């Protein structure tokens, strides 16, 4: 009835027996006693029987992408009936950005939120107590909640700046770039006041805002002096900008991305850099391989060696709970490792089932960590559509 | 672009303000010949790089005028005749021709033009400056009160086109005036921009005052937003996008025209008319798009078609080539567009097709001559990137309305009243009379006004202390 393999404390079991995990998950979401009203209703319109036909991870491809239905469905109907007690504690209702129409709504549960946040915990090891400044969307957006939880874990205080990304999108949509400029400068002004009067050890923001912050020399100096960790999410960071941030603007300060989506209720983390032997770490001053963050004999903390600086950001989702695939945008067939394609995300926990969610992102497919389902990704960028070029009058 | 032995890939990387190694971004696009053979790669820098570059440029000191002029003159020789960034001038000219389809002869003429422009900046700036104004505040005139010629801004952005190297003949004036210049090269032909920036730097222009920022269309807008003023080359779409922006000077369709009135015998002028249409393969905004004739335009149109039909179709690297070559799909697209816009116009040349496929790859864009029935025919304003001309009738009672919106108007007429009216018409940028083709240009004579008119202003100064130092 309540199979242990679905518990978040059974990650190793689930990872060792992925097909068993998928089968238990299907029995959970499509069992009358445990499934959500949404999925029990939706199952009647499927042309297959999830419990008998979905036996492996690969069989999940049978599911249609249903996320558009999450724009209208009553969120109560998304709660699996089988969730009880602590498992049923709701952290909030979160919404997708609303880029492609009305927002989609999702129920976030406490236990899952804590697990999902813990996925990149190791990046913060050794950081100690630190105050956190989040210049990121809050309100219905998952990003702000993650920042709140991160601050709590670091034992520090959290400073925030309000941000309404949907309003910015509306401004951009009607070409009001002057207003975009004023609004974003207003955000940076607020962040600047916090950074110059308070102690901030962790900065959490989006790549466009980090770029704006970096335009102010006094803030760059402040960050170099005080900030020990920069976490970005919520938008894309191209490899060249990442290079410039890491090499020129914030050298020595870990800059780590979380790539995910409210639609799958979680994030993937940046893979620690590995040397040719597959060892985590970087090259120490004496040529030996030391772990990133280790303290070497002269007392300095080793971070980001040259080889690591050259390596792209690779993102690993918390398999088997969130998995990625990279597919050909036309055929939807999975592309080969090393090739680029469109990202498909799955959320596969007892808290929610969101299969085959096609994101508006392109990425390079990277081999997953040993034992992980699906793929890791790198070089994530928005899907851009190129219209066929028509003749435009003039000679240039 | 380090040393480039023949056959080695060419890298067009950003030339940033620090003047160290070129910045090779991870995001790059392939550079190819017309036949699609790979030539190398061009970096595509992100907005973050652009903003940091321009902010470093702002922080840099302005180069003294004497040093600027000396560097411009020296750069002329390097650009024209020296190995720059490891590329021999001849290899560079062939590279441009192979990649852009511009005939080698046109490339060489354009290179010589740009070098002339660089050499004559001292004179050009003098010509552009209002009389009675001094260029340096230390001039004794300011002790009695005078106007000083000063910059309206500091950083000038250039979105270059790739038509021919001659496109780079305008912006050096900004450098001469003491502006810092951020140049975004054409993605199709970035070789000239790279070579010119490299030559100017080799000649003594400090890197922090002249940068090359290859990037995509989105980030190109960031360059304009971050600069004080900009010049942008493009089609009607680009003109429409920026025409309301007083900081942006657009170089769009020229819609240059020729008027022949009845008091002039056009038979003596047919070479000048044909040359105006086909100069630089028809790829310049100064090339004649329309010819208006008082009386029956058909004989002139027929003679013009005969003359233009004699131009041979040759590969761009052939010494006698004068017509531009484009990939066949591009040429075919232009041909389809021509058929759509031609409508009721009568084709006297190029009516079947303008596409002439070459065995060596790509297609020549052959000339087209069409006859329209009225001086108000909309086709008269259709400018396409090859020798494409619309010939129509003009009557005295039409007045100057059909001649408006011309970058260059060559008026073959002796009627002084008409000449006065044309000179007073604000939408005619340049007026040439008599036996001068629309494509006539000289260093020092403005092309679209002096850049100085756009970039400079006068500022009053009166002072009582003697100046330290001298101009």
Image: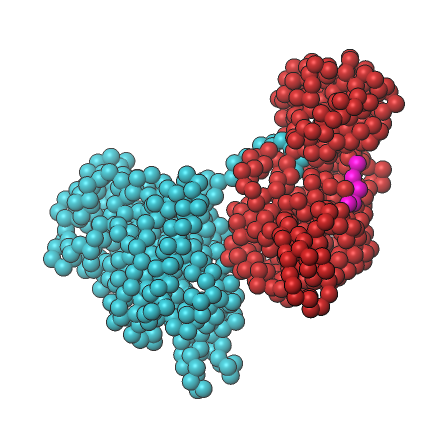
Name the residue furthest bottom. Answer: A297
- A176 vs B48: above or below: above
Quarter-wise, where is residue A84 in the image? bottom left
Total marks drawn? 0
Q: Please name whichever residue, A256 or A370, is drawn nearer the observer in this view of the structure.
A: A256
Q: Is residue B279 left or right of residue A355?
A: right
Magenta stretch bounds: B440-444
- A153 vs B441: above or below: below
Quarter-wise, where is residue A30 in the image? top left
- B375 vs B237: above or below: above
Question: Residue B176, percent across and down?
Answer: 71, 54
Q: Indicate the quadrant containing the N terminus of chain B: top left, top right, bottom left or bottom right.
A: bottom right
Coloring scheme used: by chain
Identity of the residue drawn at 81% across and 56% down? B77
Q: Indicate the quadrant containing the C terminus of chain B: top left, top right, bottom left or bottom right.
A: bottom right
Colour that chain B carries in the picture: red
Name the residue furthest right. Answer: B268
Using the rendered image of the protein, determine whether residue B435 is visible from the camera's viewpoint.
yes
Identity of the residue drawn at 44% across and 57% down? A212
Colour cyan maps to chain: A
Q: Please name whichever residue, B274 or B179, is drawn nearer the observer in this view of the structure.
A: B179
Q: Is residue B60 left or right of residue B76?
A: left
Question: Residue A114, percent across and down?
Answer: 24, 62
Q: Is residue B191 left or right of residue B443?
A: left
Quarter-wise, where is residue A196 in the image? bottom left
- A41 vs B90: above or below: above
């Amino acid at each position: 009835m309540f199979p242990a393999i679905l518990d978040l404390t059974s990650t190793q079991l689930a990872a060792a027996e992925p097909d068993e995990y998928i089968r238990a998950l299907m029995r959970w979401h499509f069992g009358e006693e445990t499934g959500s009203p949404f999925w029990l209703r939706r199952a009647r319109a499927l042309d297959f029987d999830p419990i008998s036909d979905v036996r492996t991870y690969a069989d999940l491809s049978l599911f249609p992408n249903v996320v558009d239905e999450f724009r209208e469905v009553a969120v109560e109907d998304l709660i699996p009936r089988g969730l009880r007690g602590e498992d049923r504690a709701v952290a909030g209702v979160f919404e997708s950005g609303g880029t492609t129409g009305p927002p989609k709504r999702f129920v976030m549960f406490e236990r899952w939120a804590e697990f999902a946040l813990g996925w990149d915990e190791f990046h913060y090891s050794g950081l100690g107590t630190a105050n956190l400044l989040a210049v990121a969307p809050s309100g219905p957006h998952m990003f702000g909640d993650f920042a709140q939880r991160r601050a709590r874990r670091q034992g520090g205080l959290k400073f925030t700046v309000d941000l309404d990304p949907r309003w910015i999108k509306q401004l951009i949509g009607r070409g009001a770039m002057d207003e975009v400029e004023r609004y974003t400068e207003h955000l940076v002004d607020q962040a600047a006041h916090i950074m110059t009067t308070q102690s901030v050890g962790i900065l959490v923001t989006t790549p466009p805002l980090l770029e704006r912050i970096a335009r102010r020399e006094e803030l760059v100096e402040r960050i170099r002096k005080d900030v020990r960790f920069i976490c970005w999410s919520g938008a894309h960071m191209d490899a060249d900008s990442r290079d410039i941030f890491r090499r020129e603007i914030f050298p020595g300060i870990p800059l780590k991305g979380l790539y995910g989506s409210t639609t799958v209720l979680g994030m993937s983390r940046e893979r620690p850099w590995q040397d040719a032997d597959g060892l985590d770490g970087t090259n120490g001053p004496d040529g030996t391989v030391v772990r990133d963050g280790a303290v070497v004999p002269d007392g300095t903390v080793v971070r980001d060696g040259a080889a690591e600086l050259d390596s792209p950001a690779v993102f690993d989702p918390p398999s088997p709970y969130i998995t990625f695939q990279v597919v050909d945008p036309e055929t939807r067939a999975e592309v080969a490792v090393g090739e680029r394609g469109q990202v498909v995300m799955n959320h596969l926990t007892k808290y929610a089932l969101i299969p085959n969610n096609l994101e508006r992102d392109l990425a390079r497919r990277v081999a997953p960590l040993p034992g992980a389902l699906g793929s890791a990704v790198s070089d994530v960028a928005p899907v851009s559509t190129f219209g066929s070029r028509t003749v435009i009058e003039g000679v240039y | 672009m380090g040393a480039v032995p023949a056959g080695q890939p060419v890298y067009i990387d950003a030339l940033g303000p620090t003047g160290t190694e070129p910045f090779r971004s991870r995001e790059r696009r392939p550079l190819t010949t017309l036949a699609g053979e790979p030539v190398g790669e061009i970096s595509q820098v992100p907005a973050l790089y652009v903003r940091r570059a321009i902010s470093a440029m702002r922080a840099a000191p302005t180069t003294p005028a004497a040093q600027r002029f000396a560097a411009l003159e020296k750069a002329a020789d390097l650009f024209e005749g020296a190995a720059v960034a490891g590329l021999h001038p001849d290899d560079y000219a062939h590279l441009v021709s192979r990649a852009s389809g511009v005939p080698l002869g046109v490339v060489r003429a354009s290179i010589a033009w740009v070098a002339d422009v660089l050499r004559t900046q001292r004179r050009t700036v003098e010509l552009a400056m209002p009389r009675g104004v001094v260029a340096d505040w230390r001039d004794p005139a300011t002790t009695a009160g005078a106007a000083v010629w000063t910059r309206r801004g500091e950083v000038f952005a250039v979105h270059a086109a790739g038509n021919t190297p001659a496109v780079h003949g305008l912006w050096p004036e900004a450098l001469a005036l003491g502006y810092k210049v951020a140049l975004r090269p054409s993605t199709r032909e970035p070789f000239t921009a790279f070579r010119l920036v490299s030559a100017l730097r080799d000649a003594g222009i400090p890197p922090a005052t002249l940068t090359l920022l290859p990037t995509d269309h989105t980030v190109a807008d960031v360059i304009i937003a971050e600069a004080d003023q900009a010049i942008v080359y493009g089609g009607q779409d680009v003109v429409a996008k920026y025409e309301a922006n007083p900081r942006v000077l657009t170089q769009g369709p020229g819609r240059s025209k020729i008027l022949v009135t009845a008091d002039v015998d056009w038979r003596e002028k047919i070479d000048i008319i044909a040359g105006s249409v086909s100069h630089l393969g028809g790829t310049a905004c100064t090339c004649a798009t329309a010819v208006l004739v008082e009386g029956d335009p058909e004989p002139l149109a027929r003679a013009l078609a005969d003359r233009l039909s004699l131009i041979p179709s040759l590969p761009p690297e052939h010494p006698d080539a004068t017509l531009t070559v484009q990939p066949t799909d591009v040429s075919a697209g232009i041909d389809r567009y021509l058929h759509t816009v031609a409508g009721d116009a009568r084709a006297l040349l190029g009516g079947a097709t303008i596409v002439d496929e070459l065995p060596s790859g790509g297609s020549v864009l052959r000339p087209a001559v069409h006859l329209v029935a009225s001086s108000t025919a909309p086709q008269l304003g259709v400018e396409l990137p090859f020798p494409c001309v619309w010939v129509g009738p003009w009557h005295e009672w039409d007045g100057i309305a059909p001649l408006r919106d011309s970058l260059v108007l060559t008026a073959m007429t002796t009627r002084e009243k008409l000449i006065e009216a044309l000179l007073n018409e604000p939408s005619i940028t340049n007026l040439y009379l008599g036996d001068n083709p629309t494509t006539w240009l000289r260093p020092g004579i403005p092309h679209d006004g002096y850049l100085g008119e756009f970039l400079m202003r006068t500022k009053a100064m009166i002072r009582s202390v003697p100046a330290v130092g001298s101009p």
